Image: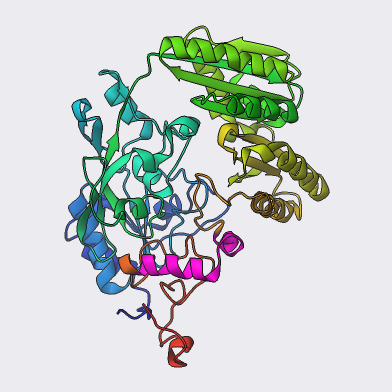
Amino acid sequence: MDSAVLAPPVPAAQLAHRFAEQLAPGSIITDPTRLSTYQCDGLAHYRVTPAVVVLPQTAAQVQHVVRVCHELGVPFVARGSGTGLSGGALPHADGVLVVTSQMRRILEVDVANELAVVEPGVINLDVTKAAAVQGWYFAPDPSSQQVCSVGGNVAENSGGAHCLKYGFTTNHVLGVEVVTPDGELVTFGGRTRDTPGYDLLGAFVGSEGTLGITTKVVVRLLRKPETVQTLLAGFRSTDAAGAAVSAIIGSGVVPAAIELMDALAIEAAEAATHCGYPDGAGAVLVVELDGPVAEVEHTFAAVQQHCRDNGSFEIRVAADDAQRALIWKGRKSAFAAVGRISPDYIVQDGVIPRTKLAEVLSAMGELADAAGVRVANVFHAGDGNLHPLVLFDDGVEGEAQRAEEVSGGILDLCLSHGGSITGEHGVGSDKAKHMPKMFTEDDLDTMQRVRCAFDPKGLSNPGKVFPTPRLCGEVPGRRTEAHPLVQAGLADAF
């Protein structure tokens, strides 16, 4: 059993000297100006400057960095492309940020065994590009897939538009090579779809960097479908579009994707990409079907009829890849495009049962009106994975606070309707305080014990996921003596 007592902060120069034993000088950053570029991930209003940034190029270099951190009791945080939206890669002020963006080799594409082996810094879309020449692809496709990294996808168990049919990242990872928090290099899973024993791979995917750093990923590849059909349907309201979603899913059709955008999200997308969505639409649906030609033709006709039956006033069918790309460009640019209509915004991520869509969207609107802020909605309607964007102006006194309150209130709405505080963005720094609303003390203690089995010193991405500093894995503070609860004989330190 290790103690939760931490050593005093280690000077950056001392850390850099130790890292230089195996890393090139250019891979170690201590200059304050350069460090400031790593203050945040995609959740830009949380900012912490790390003590040191390292950019390893090999698993051995990651091991060296982690071993030094373990020896000296220094916290460390892994970061890929930095596109996460929950502060999962937020640095630690006294810690080391391990940036894997230079580990970008696609090591193997093995279509005979339906897999590829990649380093963690490989960009999500590049996996598909590498496999496409042989007619295969990598299914998980977060909206940021052109820039997000596979290692980050594994940490956050990322999703995307096509997860309705194909599942999240965890359904497409066969194995990972990991540097554990004490510097061991281990493998969870492998090249086959099942391995005996405890599901450590399942525990690792989605653990948000709290169990170690990924240095290699074996991902599943899927054969490209025989055909793909995509449509855009315009509705006067989100209620009508939501009803169409329920009708489509209720009929037994499983689309590859169903995405819903409301009027504000459409306005933002038009301003940014000129995607030409239907005039006057209060909501649009993007519906995509894929599979064998005969099946897609049959179900595509049924989907269009469900849209018309529920009030769609305009349906456009993509005639070719260019038109399909334009439809998706509007949808996938929506998050960034909101910057065209608001100086600041919070991207929230919650999940509700699909049948509660109309009820929750209405309550969300009332919440925003009462607080005097606007909420744009663009989300994966097929599985109830909401991504409300709370718009505000940080230059207006009190508006940022009200936006934060609305953002938290939206999660409360999700929970009160049987949902979850996150679908695919992770808990990170942003939602840790909401965890007790969803889990009991026993639940959280059990999670902590799993974390402590990997990381008894609590050095790997401290301060994330769990709501407050807790005894097991408690690390954010600079405690120099035994914890009071340990002294009182009321608890053990793991």
- Find residue 436 and report its horizontal and vertical position in percent: 58, 65
Kindly indicate the quadrant of the structure image that contains residue 308: top right
Kindly indicate the quadrant of the structure image that contains residue 453: bottom left
Q: Is residue 110 above or below residue 399?
A: above
Nearest the camera: 58 or 262? 262
Q: Residue furthest front?
A: 251
Q: Residue furthest right?
A: 370
Residue 450 drawn in magenta: yes
Q: Quadrant of the N terminus?
A: bottom left
Which residue is rendered at x = 54% and y = 66% of the image?
Answer: 467
Q: Quadrant of the C terminus?
A: bottom left
- Characterize the magenta stretch by its predominant secondary structure: helix
Q: Residue furthest top?
A: 319
Residue 249 drawn in magenta: no
- Find residue 6 and report its horizontal and vertical position in percent: 37, 78
- Find residue 295 and report its horizontal and vertical position in percent: 46, 14
Q: Is residue 352 above or below residue 53?
A: above
Which residue is rendered at x = 25% and y = 18% of the image?
Answer: 134
Q: Is residue 475 above or below residue 288?
A: below
Q: Which residues are magenta?
A: 432-452
Q: How is the image coloured?
A: rainbow
Nearest the camera: 404 or 318? 318
Q: Is residue 336 visible?
A: no
Which residue is rendered at x = 62% and y = 44% of the image?
Answer: 352
- Find residue 427 and report its horizontal and vertical position in percent: 51, 54
